[in-house]
Amino acid sequence: MPDTFDLKDTFSQWLKHWWKIATISVIIGLLGLGASFILQPKYEAEVVFSTSIDQDQLDFSNLIDQFGKPLTLSQYDVDLILDSFNASLLQVKSSAFETANTLDPNLDYDRFDNNLLIERHHFNWYLHFRHPDPTIAQSVVNFWAKASLAQFEELQASGRIAPYLSVEISALADLPIKPIYHNRINLTVAGALIGFSLGLLGIDFMGRYTDFKPKEI
Protein backbone atom coordinates (compact mmCIF):
# COMPACT_ATOMS: atom_id res chain seq x y z
CA MET A 1 0.00 0.00 0.00
CA PRO A 2 1.46 3.44 -0.86
CA ASP A 3 2.13 6.07 1.78
CA THR A 4 -0.62 8.24 0.32
CA PHE A 5 -4.18 7.54 1.43
CA ASP A 6 -6.17 5.26 -0.86
CA LEU A 7 -9.74 4.72 0.28
CA LYS A 8 -10.26 1.48 -1.63
CA ASP A 9 -7.09 -0.17 -0.32
CA THR A 10 -7.67 1.14 3.20
CA PHE A 11 -11.25 -0.15 3.29
CA SER A 12 -10.06 -3.50 1.99
CA GLN A 13 -7.52 -3.74 4.84
CA TRP A 14 -10.19 -2.84 7.38
CA LEU A 15 -12.45 -5.61 6.13
CA LYS A 16 -9.58 -8.09 6.07
CA HIS A 17 -8.63 -7.35 9.68
CA TRP A 18 -12.11 -6.60 11.04
CA TRP A 19 -11.65 -9.05 13.93
CA LYS A 20 -8.59 -7.15 15.16
CA ILE A 21 -10.54 -3.88 15.13
CA ALA A 22 -13.44 -5.52 16.99
CA THR A 23 -11.07 -7.03 19.56
CA ILE A 24 -9.43 -3.67 20.29
CA SER A 25 -12.87 -2.03 20.59
CA VAL A 26 -14.05 -4.64 23.08
CA ILE A 27 -10.85 -4.49 25.16
CA ILE A 28 -10.84 -0.70 25.50
CA GLY A 29 -14.61 -0.71 26.04
CA LEU A 30 -14.08 -3.10 28.96
CA LEU A 31 -11.38 -0.80 30.29
CA GLY A 32 -13.93 2.04 30.24
CA LEU A 33 -16.41 -0.18 32.07
CA GLY A 34 -13.76 -1.00 34.66
CA ALA A 35 -12.96 2.67 35.12
CA SER A 36 -16.61 3.35 35.98
CA PHE A 37 -16.27 1.03 39.00
CA ILE A 38 -13.07 2.74 40.13
CA LEU A 39 -14.48 6.28 39.94
CA GLN A 40 -16.12 7.64 43.07
CA PRO A 41 -19.79 6.61 43.16
CA LYS A 42 -22.58 9.12 43.75
CA TYR A 43 -25.82 8.95 45.64
CA GLU A 44 -28.99 10.46 44.22
CA ALA A 45 -31.73 11.98 46.36
CA GLU A 46 -35.15 12.75 44.89
CA VAL A 47 -38.09 14.90 45.92
CA VAL A 48 -41.48 14.51 44.26
CA PHE A 49 -43.98 17.37 43.91
CA SER A 50 -47.59 16.74 43.00
CA THR A 51 -49.55 19.43 41.17
CA SER A 52 -53.20 19.92 40.35
CA ILE A 53 -55.38 22.46 38.60
CA ASP A 54 -58.60 23.54 40.30
CA GLN A 55 -60.87 23.93 37.31
CA ASP A 56 -63.68 25.16 39.55
CA GLN A 57 -61.78 28.46 39.68
CA LEU A 58 -61.77 28.67 35.89
CA ASP A 59 -65.05 30.14 34.72
CA PHE A 60 -65.58 28.95 31.15
CA SER A 61 -69.34 29.28 31.26
CA ASN A 62 -70.88 30.62 28.05
CA LEU A 63 -67.46 30.61 26.36
CA ILE A 64 -66.83 28.73 23.12
CA ASP A 65 -63.72 28.01 21.10
CA GLN A 66 -63.12 28.72 17.39
CA PHE A 67 -65.03 25.56 16.49
CA GLY A 68 -68.13 26.61 18.41
CA LYS A 69 -67.59 24.05 21.17
CA PRO A 70 -67.60 24.80 24.93
CA LEU A 71 -64.22 26.17 25.94
CA THR A 72 -61.99 23.83 27.95
CA LEU A 73 -58.33 23.70 28.86
CA SER A 74 -56.20 22.28 26.08
CA GLN A 75 -53.14 20.16 26.79
CA TYR A 76 -51.03 23.15 25.80
CA ASP A 77 -52.81 25.29 28.43
CA VAL A 78 -52.30 22.59 31.06
CA ASP A 79 -48.59 22.37 30.26
CA LEU A 80 -48.19 26.14 30.52
CA ILE A 81 -49.91 26.20 33.91
CA LEU A 82 -47.91 23.28 35.32
CA ASP A 83 -44.62 24.61 33.95
CA SER A 84 -45.04 27.83 35.90
CA PHE A 85 -43.86 25.96 38.99
CA ASN A 86 -40.48 25.58 37.32
CA ALA A 87 -39.89 29.30 37.90
CA SER A 88 -40.05 28.74 41.65
CA LEU A 89 -37.55 25.90 41.44
CA LEU A 90 -35.09 27.99 39.43
CA GLN A 91 -35.43 31.15 41.52
CA VAL A 92 -34.10 29.39 44.63
CA LYS A 93 -31.42 27.45 42.76
CA SER A 94 -28.70 29.84 43.94
CA SER A 95 -29.78 29.33 47.55
CA ALA A 96 -29.65 25.58 47.03
CA PHE A 97 -26.10 25.91 45.73
CA GLU A 98 -25.10 28.01 48.75
CA THR A 99 -26.46 25.28 51.01
CA ALA A 100 -24.60 22.60 49.05
CA ASN A 101 -21.39 24.64 49.10
CA THR A 102 -21.70 25.11 52.86
CA LEU A 103 -21.96 21.34 53.32
CA ASP A 104 -19.22 20.67 50.76
CA PRO A 105 -16.83 23.66 50.39
CA ASN A 106 -15.06 21.92 47.50
CA LEU A 107 -18.23 21.87 45.41
CA ASP A 108 -18.19 24.52 42.68
CA TYR A 109 -21.23 25.73 40.74
CA ASP A 110 -20.45 23.76 37.57
CA ARG A 111 -20.28 20.45 39.43
CA PHE A 112 -23.41 21.39 41.34
CA ASP A 113 -25.24 22.16 38.09
CA ASN A 114 -24.03 18.98 36.40
CA ASN A 115 -25.38 16.83 39.24
CA LEU A 116 -28.93 18.11 39.40
CA LEU A 117 -32.00 17.31 37.36
CA ILE A 118 -35.44 18.93 37.24
CA GLU A 119 -38.10 17.15 35.24
CA ARG A 120 -41.86 16.86 34.95
CA HIS A 121 -43.91 13.79 34.12
CA HIS A 122 -47.57 14.56 33.70
CA PHE A 123 -48.71 16.25 36.96
CA ASN A 124 -45.60 15.41 38.98
CA TRP A 125 -42.36 17.38 39.23
CA TYR A 126 -39.15 15.59 40.21
CA LEU A 127 -36.08 17.22 41.73
CA HIS A 128 -32.88 15.15 41.78
CA PHE A 129 -29.45 15.87 43.19
CA ARG A 130 -26.37 13.62 43.19
CA HIS A 131 -23.38 13.76 45.53
CA PRO A 132 -20.72 11.33 46.81
CA ASP A 133 -22.04 11.92 50.35
CA PRO A 134 -25.64 10.62 50.65
CA THR A 135 -26.46 12.91 53.58
CA ILE A 136 -25.46 15.98 51.54
CA ALA A 137 -27.54 14.82 48.58
CA GLN A 138 -30.55 14.39 50.84
CA SER A 139 -30.05 17.67 52.72
CA VAL A 140 -29.61 19.77 49.58
CA VAL A 141 -32.59 18.40 47.69
CA ASN A 142 -34.91 18.64 50.71
CA PHE A 143 -33.82 22.22 51.42
CA TRP A 144 -34.35 23.10 47.77
CA ALA A 145 -37.80 21.53 47.74
CA LYS A 146 -39.02 23.39 50.82
CA ALA A 147 -37.55 26.68 49.60
CA SER A 148 -39.17 26.20 46.18
CA LEU A 149 -42.57 25.56 47.72
CA ALA A 150 -42.24 28.69 49.88
CA GLN A 151 -41.22 30.69 46.80
CA PHE A 152 -44.19 29.31 44.88
CA GLU A 153 -46.61 30.32 47.63
CA GLU A 154 -45.08 33.81 47.72
CA LEU A 155 -45.40 34.23 43.95
CA GLN A 156 -48.95 32.94 44.04
CA ALA A 157 -49.90 35.32 46.85
CA SER A 158 -48.51 38.23 44.84
CA GLY A 159 -50.59 37.24 41.81
CA ARG A 160 -47.65 36.26 39.62
CA ILE A 161 -48.78 32.62 39.51
CA ALA A 162 -52.36 31.62 38.83
CA PRO A 163 -54.37 30.77 41.98
CA TYR A 164 -55.89 27.65 40.44
CA LEU A 165 -52.53 25.82 40.42
CA SER A 166 -51.84 23.78 43.55
CA VAL A 167 -48.45 22.29 44.42
CA GLU A 168 -47.43 20.16 47.36
CA ILE A 169 -44.49 17.97 48.28
CA SER A 170 -45.72 14.42 48.03
CA ALA A 171 -42.42 12.84 49.07
CA LEU A 172 -39.31 14.36 50.61
CA ALA A 173 -36.03 12.61 49.85
CA ASP A 174 -35.06 9.64 51.95
CA LEU A 175 -31.40 9.00 52.66
CA PRO A 176 -30.11 7.26 49.51
CA ILE A 177 -28.56 3.89 50.30
CA LYS A 178 -27.51 2.52 46.94
CA PRO A 179 -24.91 4.40 44.85
CA ILE A 180 -25.49 5.08 41.18
CA TYR A 181 -23.04 5.04 38.32
CA HIS A 182 -24.35 7.52 35.75
CA ASN A 183 -21.16 7.46 33.70
CA ARG A 184 -20.92 3.68 33.32
CA ILE A 185 -22.60 3.45 29.93
CA ASN A 186 -20.90 6.61 28.68
CA LEU A 187 -17.44 5.38 29.68
CA THR A 188 -18.04 1.97 28.14
CA VAL A 189 -19.29 3.40 24.84
CA ALA A 190 -16.52 6.00 24.77
CA GLY A 191 -13.93 3.28 25.36
CA ALA A 192 -15.38 1.16 22.56
CA LEU A 193 -15.38 4.11 20.15
CA ILE A 194 -11.80 5.00 21.05
CA GLY A 195 -10.79 1.36 20.56
CA PHE A 196 -12.58 1.27 17.21
CA SER A 197 -10.77 4.42 16.06
CA LEU A 198 -7.40 3.11 17.24
CA GLY A 199 -8.08 -0.17 15.49
CA LEU A 200 -8.80 1.58 12.20
CA LEU A 201 -5.69 3.73 12.50
CA GLY A 202 -3.55 0.78 13.56
CA ILE A 203 -4.65 -1.43 10.65
CA ASP A 204 -4.16 1.46 8.23
CA PHE A 205 -0.65 2.08 9.60
CA MET A 206 0.28 -1.59 9.36
CA GLY A 207 -1.05 -1.75 5.83
CA ARG A 208 0.97 1.27 4.75
CA TYR A 209 4.28 0.67 6.41
CA THR A 210 4.43 -3.00 7.37
CA ASP A 211 2.40 -5.41 5.25
CA PHE A 212 3.23 -3.88 1.89
CA LYS A 213 6.66 -2.46 2.50
CA PRO A 214 8.98 -3.60 -0.36
CA LYS A 215 11.71 -5.99 0.69
CA GLU A 216 15.18 -4.54 0.62
CA ILE A 217 17.66 -6.34 -1.65
Image: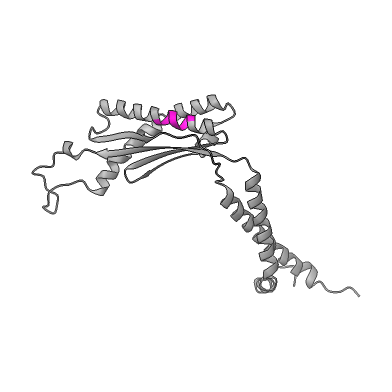
Which residue occupies 54% across, 46% down?
182
Q: Is residue 43 left or right of residue 40?
A: left
Residue 129 percent location from the top left of the image: 48, 37
**Does residue 61 show up magenta in the picture?**
no
Q: Give the colouring mode of the picture.
A: one colour
Q: Nearer the viewer, residue 203 or 157?
A: 157
Can residue 5 be seen here? no
Q: Is residue 89 left or right of residue 109?
A: left
Can residue 103 be seen here? yes
Residue 119 percent location from the top left of the image: 40, 42
Residue 38 percent location from the top left of the image: 66, 44
Q: Quadrant of residue 172?
A: top left
Figure quadrant of the N terminus = bottom right
Does 186 appear above or below 49?
below
Q: Nearer the viewer, residue 4 or 55?
A: 55
Most extreme residue toward the top is: 102
Most extreme residue toward the right is: 217
Which residue occupies 14% across, 51% down?
66
Q: Is residue 89 left or right of residue 24?
A: left
What number of labels is visible? 0
Which residue occupies 70% across, 71% down?
17
**Does residue 143 show up magenta in the picture?**
yes
Residue 5 percent location from the top left of the image: 69, 68
Q: Main secondary structure of the magenta part?
A: helix
Where are the magenta residues, as a range?
Answer: 139-145
Most extreme residue toward the left is: 62
Figure quadrant of the C terminus = bottom right
Which residue occupies 80% across, 68% down?
210
